[in-house]
Image (cartoon, grey):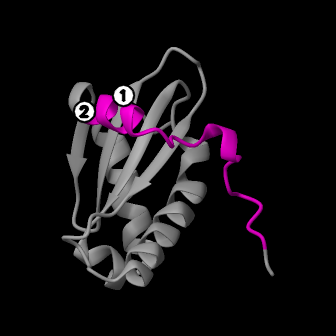
Amino acid sequence: MNINKKELPANEMLTARSDFVTVQSKGKKWVSNGLILQMRKNDLGIIRTGYTVSKKVDKSAVMRNRIKRRLRSVMAEVLPNATNGYDYILVGRKLTLTRPYNDLINDFKWCLKKTELYKK
C-alpha cells in the first residue's frame, strides 16, 4: 500500500459534529465549481481539517468516499501554503468526482486566495 507522505496527522482532523456545525455557522464560505470551502479561525494556532459529502451528492457510499479521498489529496497538496490557525472544511459537490485533479487544486487555491489565506 502506497502511503501519501503529505497526509495530515489524524489529531489535526475535525471529527466532532459540533466542530463542523461551528465552522458552518460562524465561519466563512467560498464556493467553486469543484468544491466548497468553509473556514473559521481557531484559537489553537494549528490547521485542522474536515471533509464532508452529503447523500444529496451521491447515494452510493463508495462514490462519496471516493470524493472524500480526492478532497483529502487536494487538501494535502495545497494546505502547506495556507495560513495556520484555521479550521478548513472541504465540502464535496457532484463535479468533484469527475473534475480533473488539477482543476480541483486550482479551485481550492482560488478559494484560499479569496479568503486571503493563501501564502504563495
In the rendered structure, which segment of residues is drawn in magenta? 3-24
In the image: residue 6, left or right of residue 58: right
Residue under the point 23% across and 45% down: 30
Callout 2 touching callout 1 (CB < 8 Å): yes
Q: Is residue 30 above or below residue 73?
A: above
**In this rendering, does residue 109 appear at all?**
yes
Residue under the point 30% across and 35% down: 21
Residue under the point 25% across and 33% down: 28
Foreground residue among 1 and 59: 59
Where in the figure is residue 90, as x and y percent of width and height?
38, 53
Q: Quadrant of residue 91?
A: bottom left
In the image: residue 78, left or right of residue 41: right
Q: Is residue 87 magenta?
A: no
Where in the figure is residue 15, as x and y percent of width and height?
51, 43
Badge number at residue 77: none
Q: Quadrant of residue 88?
A: top left
Q: Is residue 22 magenta?
A: yes
Q: Which residue is mark 2?
A: 28
User: Hey, what amino acid is under mark 1?
Assistant: Arg
Q: Which residue is mark 1?
A: 40
Q: Is residue 28 above or below residue 70?
A: above
Of the numbered discs 2 and 1, the one sitting upstream in the chain is 2
Foreground residue among 47 and 68: 68
Q: Secondary structure at mark 1?
A: strand
**In this rendering, does residue 116 appear at all?**
no
Where in the figure is residue 87, as x and y percent of width and height?
45, 33
